[in-house]
Amino acid sequence: MRRSLYSISIDREELRRFRKFFVVRNDLENFVTFEAGRRRPIYNWFYYKEAFSPELIFTLLDEFGITNANIIDPFCGVGTTLLASVERNCNAVGFDILPLSVFVSNVKLQRDYDMKLLREKIKEITSLKFGETELKWPDIKFISIKKSISRYARNDLLFFKERIMEIEDEKIRNFIFLGLLSISFRATNLVRDGGVLKIDKSKRRNQIPVRHLLRNKLKRMYKDVKNNLNKFNENVNAYAKVGDARSLGIKSEFDLCITSPPYLNWVDYTKIYAIELALLGLSYQEILELRKRSLRSHVGAEYKIRKRIKSEKLESILENLNKFDVKSPEVLRGYFEDLYLSLRSIYNSLNDNAICAIVIGNACLPGITVDCDVILAELAEEIGFSLKRIEVAKVRWCGVHGIKKERPVRESIVVLET
Ligand SMILES: C[S@@+](CC[C@H](N)C(=O)[O-])C[C@H]1O[C@@H](n2cnc3c(N)ncnc32)[C@H](O)[C@@H]1O
């Protein structure tokens, strides 16, 4: 991170009160993304671009001097916090609105496999000859499954799913099904481009058959289990559950929260992971329901306010943002109301003197830069947290309307204490 870029990013009058809290953390730059974790066994079983790396959790646990703690991640994604916590002998619980993320997290946390049976079942599934299936793809309307996946791959994905579902041993069934889910996107003609799925013709030309993708994936996953499971202490407990971070309903149970909510970037997770959600077995209606219930960081979420939030701070922040001519201003209101609700529910779930570290990116909209890290800190203070630091891991130039280098935006870790 260039020092000058960092200085410009905090050099604004309205950020004056926060200047003493800002800390440059070049060392965390690669840890706030999935990249550093891509080579890590088990963590890399499912590619989730929005995930952070386990190195971030290890670094924070060392810095906070935390051992044997109960850790919560209310936006757990594919379970990075949970798995890293277990590696450091901590209990951990995660929540996510997407059943896909919860499934991935829980399979990564599985232990005590019957290794002989696992090997046999992998061999059995990957040696199956081509066959027909009774299963059907749901019509998810916002993507044409027919155009996105070749006829062979469409059939193969469902054929393998059907056979995998016949495996009796639940852990082994889940393990092999995760293998299939994680290669499913590679078997399509789609690419993820920011927040949208696009057909990529070159992918169609270079398509690798599902059975080869699956065989290779399961081989790697099996090796990971064999080489790494002894790293995990059997006496610690970690799991993920489907849940809404805005209403966890937990009272004083955790010593530490490490999490990262969706960023204010209009990305709809139910769109970019639609193929995997459909393969998991969700119908179009169920996907739409999830979309509505997800954090209001995109236009597909439900914008009806369920409960009025009484916060003058929130209102004054929103009033300030309203001065700018932002397209879909309801997204801004929805996003910060949801952050407020999530912070309140996280605060309630924590013990006294607990720490909460939240990874968040600032938003770059036409006309304004939204300092989500600072706004989150202000809302957290209003709820009762005390702000310790805003650790700036990354600053990049944001380009709006093709104008490069317009304004710098930060990606930060806001460190709070109860
Ligand atoms: C930035 S990602 C978290 C990634 C995670 N740190 C990891 O390493 O995998 C944000 C997550 O929040 C989830 N999410 C969206 N709305 C939610 C809600 N209302 N409650 C809980 N999770 C939600 C998304 O499904 C997504 O997995």
Image (cartoon, rainbow, N blue to C red):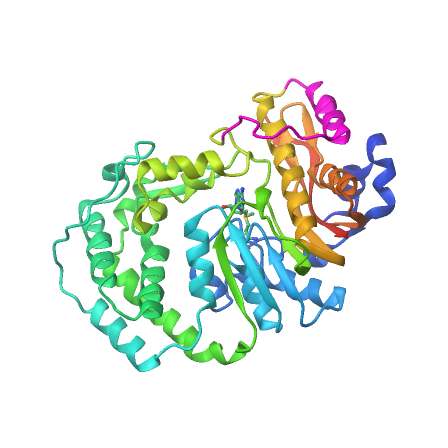
Magenta stretch holds residue 381: no
182 sits left or right of 55 in the view: left
Residue 29: x percent and y percent?
66, 54
- What residue sits 33% from the left and 51% below the top? 280
Q: Is residue 403 visible?
A: no
Magenta stretch holds residue 324: yes
| Count of residue discs | 0
Q: Which residues are magenta?
A: 302-325
The one nearer the camera, 339 or 347, is: 347
Residue 304: x percent and y percent?
53, 26
The one nearer the camera, 186 or 101, is: 101
- The answer to whether residue 82 is above or below residue 266 is below
- What residue sits 28% from the left and 66% below the top? 215
Q: Quadrant of residue 225?
A: bottom left
Residue 63: x percent and y percent?
75, 65
- What residue sits 87% from the left and 46% below the top? 20
Q: Is residue 229 visible?
A: yes
